[in-house]
Each structure stands twice: as C-alpha cells, then as structure tokens.
C-alpha cells in the first residue's frame, strides 16, 4: 500500500477528523507478532532514511522541513527520536516550539520559525510549529481584539488571513527548494488518557506530565475543529499534510518513515560528481596503474 497517497490530504479537501480512524493499522493486525513485523520494517527504513539524508547532504541543493503536530501524548517526541533519529545529527536541526517568550510575541508569528528554516542539504524538524498560532492560540482566544480589529471585520477573517499567510510562507520556501512535509499524528481521546495514565503510573515518565495536559482535554473538540480548519486550509501541493493514525505507535512511526522515504526517493537525488579524478590520484600517489595493482604507501 502506498501510504503517501493514502494519508495525504488532497489540496482543497475538507477534513473531518471524526471520520478518520485513529487505530487503523493497514494490513497489520493488532498483535505482538505484527507489531514486531512493523518494527523490523521500520529498522530497515531507518537505514534507507540515513542513506537518503546523506544524499541530500552530499547534493547540497535542496532542504527538508518536517513539521510535527498533534494532541499531547500522540507520539511526536517518539517519532522524532525513533524515526528521524536515524538521520545524521550533523545534517539535522530539531526545534521544539513552546509557549512564545515576550520577545517572540512582540514579532510577527512567523518570525521565530523563520530562523530555523533548513539551509541547503539540511533537514529541520519542528516539534510543534507556526501551526500553534492557529491551534492553541485560536482555541484559547489568545489574540487580543486590539490586535486584529483595525484590520478585520471579524475574528474569523483574521484566522482565515493567518492561514493564508501560512500557505504563502510555505509556498515561498518550497519555491526556494525546501521540501515541506507536515504530519498530524491522529490519536484517539481514550488512547490519550491511557497514555496519560502511563505517565503518572510510571515514575520515570512523571516528568512528562503537566496539569495542563489534563485540563486541556476539556477543549478536545475545539482542538479537533481547529486542526480540521488548519489542515483543510493549508494542505497544498508544495506543502502537504499527512494525517497519520496514531493509536499504535509502531504503526504511526512506520507510516511516517514510509512517507518520508517515498518522498525523498521521488526527488531522484544523486551524489555530486567528484571534482577529482580518482584514477589519476591512484596512479600518482599510490602507484596503482591497473585495477589489480597493490597500492604503495611509500610514494608520498
Ligand atoms: P510533550 O509531548 O512532551 O508534552 P509538548 O510539545 O506538549 O511536549 P510542552 O512543554 O508540554 O511540550 O508544551 C508546549 C506548549 O506550548 C503546548 O501546550 C503548546 O500548545 C504551547 N505553544 C506552542 N506554541 C505556542 C504559541 N504560539 N502560543 C501559545 N502556546 C504555544
Ligand atoms: Mg505537553
């Protein structure tokens, strides 16, 4: 199955998250055996991903921006470490976007993300992103009327304009050679609570919980609506969204890896042509004139 095609949000499509299964596992059954199979496949994919990233780095022509968004405990952190961790840290840059600082808030909302755009040959991974500015900020009404009123008749127009800005921004970096892939890890509300329980029941996971995680559950529907609006408005050909069923971590990780590999392979990347003549160096410095010759190490 081609998961890139299956999970992509077609540009212009209207997303209804309640119609998309969170516990989907494709041809895999929800058994230990199949989970093991998926993990094995992920292991192979990690090798491929590492090679593809090396090509991206060697080629030094384009860059990749991976955006991870999800409700709490949906598995962003795990995907970043268990999937993207396969890439060479020298070519990647991961940023977690938290509640903005005073300084960040005093700028345009894209200011803080722009500084982390990947340069040629590099991959940037955003753990949360500028999308928070149309998600938590929208759910909790964090933009004062003073700010939007001079420019818009109503707040809905303000959000629509913000999403248009996001589209324009992503298209502009895409036109500059950045491959933008956006993943929404779609976890169920019940599964989230089970994971929250694990975090409180297992002492070594306690550090991951905050009271806010629990209190935010009362806004679940509002968050889902904000995600639906944002994803529907901003999935474009140049910067597509993928909605990944995330109740089973072994499945969501595998799916993300498949989609990323599929995309990178479609670029037809090549290692750059060497600037030197290997045969000439072999001859000149190692005395190797023919393929079978033993190299000499006493010439230079
Ligand atoms: P974890 O899964 O480990 O909890 P996390 O990404 O939720 O990771 P936290 O420190 O728990 O990290 O939460 C960061 C918080 O910052 C989130 O609640 C997020 O919504 C919030 N945040 C991010 N960007 C903005 C923004 N632009 N405005 C307001 N809040 C934001
Ligand atoms: Mg959190």
Image (cartoon, grey):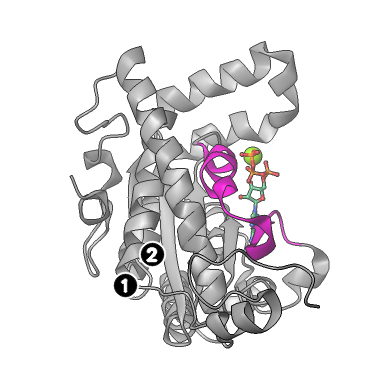
Of 29 and 37, the residue lying toward us: 37
Horizontally, is 165 left or right of 77 in the view? left
Q: Which quadrant of the view contains residue 92?
A: bottom right
- Of the 4 image quadrants, the one containing the N terminus is top left
Residue at image position (27%, 57%) is 8
Q: Which quadrant of the view contains residue 199?
A: top right
Q: Secondary structure at mark 2?
A: helix
Mark 1 neighbour class, 10 Å CA radius: few under 14, some 14 to 19, many 20 or more? some
Circle 2 residue: 264
Q: Where residue 274 sits: x, y (%)?
A: 54, 83
- Of the 4 image quadrants, the one containing the C terminus is bottom right
Mark 2 neighbour class, 10 Å CA radius: few under 14, some 14 to 19, many 20 or more? some
Residue at image position (43%, 51%) is 48
Label 2 CB, ligand 1: below 8 Å?
no
Of 68 and 228, the residue lying toward us: 68
Residue at image position (66%, 84%) is 284
Q: Earlier in the sequence, mark 2 or mark 1?
A: 1
* Residue 300, magenta (yes or no): no
Q: Is residue 231 above or below residue 12?
A: above
Q: Which residues are magenta?
A: 75-100
Q: Is residue 60 above or below residue 39?
A: below
């Amino acid at each position: 199955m081609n998961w890139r095609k299956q999970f992509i949000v077609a540009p212009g499509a209207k997303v209804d998250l309640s119609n998309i299964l969170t516990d989907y596992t494709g041809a895999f059954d929800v058994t230990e055996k199949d989970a093991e199979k998926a993990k094995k496949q992920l292991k192979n994919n990690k090798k491929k991903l590492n090679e593809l990233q090396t090509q991206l780095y060697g080629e030094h022509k384009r860059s990749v921006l991976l955006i991870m968004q999800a409700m709490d405990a949906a598995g962003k952190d795990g995907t970043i470490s268990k999937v993207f961790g396969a890439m060479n840290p020298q070519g990647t840059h991961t940023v977690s976007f938290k509640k903005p600082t005073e300084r960040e808030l005093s700028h345009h909302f894209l200011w803080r993300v722009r500084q982390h755009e990947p340069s040629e040959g590099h991959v940037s991974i955003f753990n949360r992103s500028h999308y928070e500015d149309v998600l938590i900020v929208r759910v909790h009404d964090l933009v004062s009327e003073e700010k939007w009123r001079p420019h818009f008749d109503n707040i809905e127009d303000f959000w629509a304009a913000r999403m248009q800005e996001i589209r324009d921004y992503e298209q502009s970096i895409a036109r500059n050679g950045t491959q933008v892939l956006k993943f929404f890890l779609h976890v169920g509300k019940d599964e989230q609570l089970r994971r929250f329980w694990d975090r409180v029941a297992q002492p070594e996971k306690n550090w991951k919980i905050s009271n806010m995680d629990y209190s935010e559950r009362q806004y679940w529907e509002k968050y889902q609506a904000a995600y639906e609006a944002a994803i529907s408005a901003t999935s474009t050909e140049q910067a597509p969204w993928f909605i990944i069923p995330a109740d089973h971590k072994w499945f969501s990780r595998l799916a993300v890896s498949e989609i990323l590999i599929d995309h990178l392979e479609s670029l037809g990347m090549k290692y750059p042509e060497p600037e030197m003549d290997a045969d000439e160096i072999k001859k000149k410095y190692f005395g190797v004139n023919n393929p079978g010759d033993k190299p000499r190490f006493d010439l230079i």
